Amino acid sequence: MTGRKGFTLIELMVVILIVGILAAASIPLMRGRIDSAKWAEANATAGTIRSAVRVYYAEHGSAPTGGLGVAATRTALGFDEADLTGTYFLPSDYTIVSVNSNGQAEIRVQGSQDNAPTGTKTLTTDGVWQ
């Protein structure tokens, strides 16, 4: 008598069902992590802009505000357009909202490209990314 080895159709269907449930549960979690990774690019660039504003403020006693899509603002802070162009964000996506009396800037970021995450985030004068 020969023993048959292998899985039955029911066993295979149960395994496929379990894998499907796990995939359905994990996709929304991964999507949120993808947006977080995209916003990390904006956070890093906003931090660089914030540092440049602080240096400018220390040297000149005031600092430029407005969008970094303007060449004069980028040049004043020592940036080239390519310095602020990332995978998900462009220079025009960054706006210096205000600069406090210590030279610390508040920077707002809103993606304009198709692959950018939705919404707006701000790097506050306290250095909090929200």
Image (tube, rainbow, N blue to C red):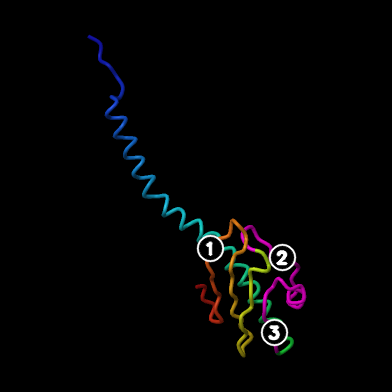
In this rendering, is residue 31 above or below 77? above
Name the residue rendered at 34%, 44% in the picture. 21
Residue identified by numbered label 2: 83
Whichever of labels 2 and 1 marks the residue nearer the N terminus, that label is: 2
Name the residue rendered at 74%, 87% in the picture. 60
**Marking on residue 34:** none
Type of amino acid under label 3 = Ala
Whichever of labels 1 and 3 marks the residue nearer the N terminus, that label is: 3
In this rendering, is residue 4 above or below 16? above
Distance from label 1 to label 3 (Cα)? 29 Å
Distance from label 2 to label 1 (Cα)? 22 Å
Residue identified by numbered label 1: 118
Q: Which residues are magenta?
A: 62-89
Residue 39: give x, y in percent of width and height.
Answer: 55, 64
Which element carries disc 1, helix, strand or loop?
loop
Residue 12: image quadrant is: top left
Pick the front one: 111 or 128: 111
Residue identified by numbered label 3: 63
Name the residue rendered at 69%, 73% in the picture. 68
